[in-house]
Image (cartoon, grey):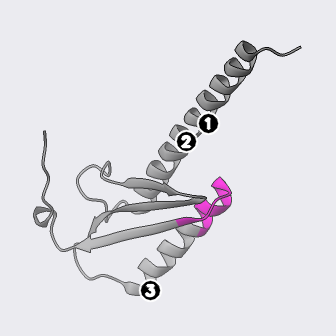
Amino acid sequence: MITIFDFNLVISKFKTIAFKTKIAQDEIIRRFVRSFFPDYITVHGSELVIKRQGNCIRVAGFFHYRNRLNIREIYWMFGFVEEFLSILLKQPVKLEIQFVADEKDLAYNYI
């Protein structure tokens, strides 16, 4: 017979496992995007924001372009990253990336 205490223990273990899964997914996303876009990442690449909305994962952040920007290459890379991460994580993944000309255009508030 299952008691309330046992039920709460099972729920707390499930929440812990779900939390650890989200942390692992976030790290996979950050490392993959950093390694796939090494020329475009600003500062250290830690400025990527990962938002979960329902079943969809949205990755937002800023990239900077140095010389000439090849639009076809960028669109292909975006599509590849979205599709690969969607298949890997079994959830739809959308990239919301803004390009800036210089890293100095970004305003950071450090507290």
Which amino acid type is marked by label 2?
Answer: Lys
| Horizontal arrangement in the rendering, residue 96 relative to residue 41 (left or right) | right
Front position among marks 2 and 3: 2
Q: Can you tell which quarter of the image residue 2 is in?
A: top right
17 or 62, nearer to the observer: 17
Residue pushed farthest front?
4
Alpha carbon of mark 1 to alpha carbon of mark 3: how far?
38 Å
Alpha carbon of mark 2 to alpha carbon of mark 1: how far?
6 Å
Is residue 69 part of the magenta span, yes or no?
A: no
Q: Can you tell which quarter of the image residue 98 is in?
A: bottom left
Q: State which tag comes first along the sequence, 2 or 3.
A: 2
Q: Label 3 belongs to which residue? A: 72
Secondary structure of the residue carrying numbered label 1: helix
Q: Label 1 belongs to which residue? A: 18
Q: Which residues are magenta?
A: 83-93
Which amino acid type is marked by label 1?
Answer: Ala
- Residue 73 in the image: above or below residue 31: below
96 or 37, nearer to the observer: 96
Q: Main secondary structure of the magenta part?
A: helix
The tag on residue 45 is none
